[in-house]
């Protein structure tokens, strides 16, 4: 008798459900990953909402404002992000020391991160004062757009220290696996930022209409409030007297943080710089193309950035497992996070492909200053590119997070640099020189770059060399 395929599948379903339940309950399974990751995903989503609110209000303000916001914000973030990566990498050291049952080192690690935040904050403020004004003119943007971009970028860079401070304080909680305080602080920052956006951009309650500069001030105010609240929570949760005793700079420990956190921060810089370069080159295609791409990338940010919370969670869990010499636990955490990531990204990718008009309408309601049929139709097409590469980008996030948690940051830095140069930067320049640069050719190049990164991350993790790296000595 020929077996019935439907019956066979039905018989296998309980076995599948049992495996799902077993992975839910096991150490480093779904419950464990979600317990650490969900507050971080919600926290990153709140930060995304802060930036999204800026772009949404600005899209109702003027076409020039929304065209200038993303290039300027991306450039500022690209300059800040190497230092954010170093400060945040303290979470991996803390997680590995906790896994190795050495909690006495946590305070000293946090303070080295805070010292790096202070030094870097001063350097970035100086860069904002003297370099932001000329950067966009040199890149060939229209004069009126470059003037707006310079204002936005300068304000964000002058306020770098609170951003780095928040990264250091967040690393403390992420490394301990207690991530709810990070969510609370970031939600508080968003709650302040959104009404300030409306007040400062449009000039309500008797204040002058500040436009793009008002959006930058509102963002900075929200970030500063989050940093202050996080600092209070750290010294309350971490017994302030014990943490205060570790305040002195320890050069050897700081150099160790820079040795592993430096490549991690540079990896983030290369990734962000690649996207910033891409956005800045789009500026040469005209205001309509730039505005459509900026809206699409703002939607992409809304979908993508919450997953960076999962990236931090994977780094912490892998670091904790390897601190206790539990390699299988690190692999389990990575696999669990990958399943969660794909479950999150799949419906969102479908919505981007099938409901592009709805996403574009959020930025372009009828009668709004930035409403344009050409921008809207172009954006709907470009959202299909985002839908196509978003699934493989989720693999990027998980595998690179696992490698970061293991301390395998130097190889990833070299590989990311090579990919950014040879698969994104040079191809874009070649298309421009050959007269083939268009929205579709540039976005196809970006999609190929994202897929190649995913293959690199998977291959490096599968190779297993990360298992031999030791950040913490027994």
Image (cartoon, helix red, strand yellow):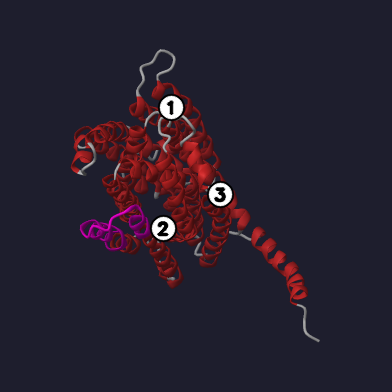
Looking at the picture, tell me which residue is in the foreground, 209 or 421. 209
Instruction: Say which residue label 2 marks.
Output: 404
Question: Range of the magenta residues?
Answer: 419-445
Image quadrant containing the C terminus:
bottom left
* Mark 2 vs 1, N-terminal side: 1
Q: Badge 3 local density, few (<14 within 10 Å), some, or many (20+)? A: many
**Residue shown at 31%/39% (left/top)?**
72
Left or right, residue 244 beside residue 422: right
* Mark 2 vs 3, N-terminal side: 3
Which element is circle 3 on?
helix
Examine the image and state in which quarter residue 207 appears: top left
Q: Is residue 158 above or below residue 453?
A: above
Left or right, residue 82 beside residue 49: left
Q: Residue 182 carries which label?
A: none
Which element is circle 1 on?
helix
Question: Nearer the observer, disc 2 or disc 1?
Answer: 1
Q: Does the magenta stretch include residue 424?
A: yes
Looking at the picture, tell me which residue is in the foreground, 189 or 302. 302
Q: Badge 1 local density, few (<14 within 10 Å), some, or many (20+)? A: many
Q: Is residue 204 magenta?
A: no
Left or right, residue 208 beside residue 139: right
Label 1 – label 3 distance at C-alpha: 31 Å
In percent of width and height, residue 142 lies at: 23, 38
State the predominant SS element of the stretch in magenta: helix
Instruction: Say which residue label 1 marks.
Output: 197
* Mark 1 vs 3, N-terminal side: 3
Instruction: Say which residue label 3 marks.
Output: 36
Looking at the picture, tell me which residue is in the foreground, 396 or 375. 375
Looking at the picture, tell me which residue is in the foreground, 78 or 274. 274
Which element is circle 2 on?
helix
Residue 261 visible in the shown view: no
């Amino acid at each position: 008798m020929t077996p019935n395929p439907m019956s066979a599948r039905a018989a296998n379903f309980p076995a599948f459900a049992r495996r799902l339940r077993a992975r839910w309950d096991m150490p480093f399974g779904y419950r464990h990953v979600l317990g650490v990751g969900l507050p971080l995903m919600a926290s990153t989503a709140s930060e995304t909402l802060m930036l999204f609110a800026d772009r949404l209000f600005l899209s109702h303000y003027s076409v020039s404002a929304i065209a200038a916001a993303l290039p300027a914000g991306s450039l500022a973030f690209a300059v800040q992000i190497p230092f954010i990566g170093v400060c945040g990498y303290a979470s991996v050291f803390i997680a590995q020391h906790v896994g190795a049952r050495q909690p006495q080192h946590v305070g000293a690690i946090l303070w080295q991160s805070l010292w790096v935040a202070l030094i870097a904050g001063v350097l970035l403020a100086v860069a904002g004062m003297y370099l932001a004004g000329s950067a966009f003119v040199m890149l060939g943007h229209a004069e009126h757009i470059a003037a707006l971009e310079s204002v936005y970028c300068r304000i964000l860079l002058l306020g770098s220290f609170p951003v780095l401070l928040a990264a250091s304080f967040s690393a403390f909680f992420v490394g301990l696996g207690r991530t709810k305080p990070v969510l609370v602080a970031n939600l508080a920052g968003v709650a302040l930022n959104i009404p300030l956006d409306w007040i400062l951009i449009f000039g309500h309650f008797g204040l002058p209409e500040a436009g793009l500069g008002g959006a930058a001030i509102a963002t900075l105010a929200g970030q500063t409030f989050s940093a202050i609240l996080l600092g209070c929570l750290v010294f309350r949760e971490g017994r302030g007297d014990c943490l205060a005793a570790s305040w002195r700079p320890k050069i050897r420990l700081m150099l160790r943080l820079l040795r592993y956190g430096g490549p991690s921060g540079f990896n983030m810089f290369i990734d962000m710089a690649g996207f910033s370069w891409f956005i800045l080159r789009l500026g040469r295609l005209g205001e309509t193309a730039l505005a459509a791409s900026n809206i699409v990338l703002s939607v992409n940010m809304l979908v993508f950035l919450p997953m960076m919370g999962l990236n931090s969670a994977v780094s912490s869990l892998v670091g904790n497992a390897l601190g206790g010499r539990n390699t299988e636990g690190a692999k389990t955490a990575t696999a669990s996070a990958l399943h969660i990531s794909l479950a999150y990204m799949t419906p969102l990718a479908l919505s981007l492909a099938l409901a592009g008009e709805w996403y574009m309408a959020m930025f372009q309601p009828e009668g709004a200053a930035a409403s344009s049929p050409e921008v809207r139709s172009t954006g709907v097409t470009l959202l299909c590119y985002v839908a196509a590469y978003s699934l493989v980008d989720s693999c990027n996030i998980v595998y690179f997070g696992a490698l970061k948690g293991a301390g395998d940051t130097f190889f990833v830095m070299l590989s990311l640099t090579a990919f950014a140069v040879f698969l994104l930067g040079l191809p874009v320049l070649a298309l421009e020189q050959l007269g083939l640069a268009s929205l579709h050719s540039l976005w196809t190049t970006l999609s190929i770059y994202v897929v190649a990164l995913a293959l690199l991350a998977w291959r490096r993790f599968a190779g297993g060399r990360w298992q031999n790296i030791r950040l913490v000595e027994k």
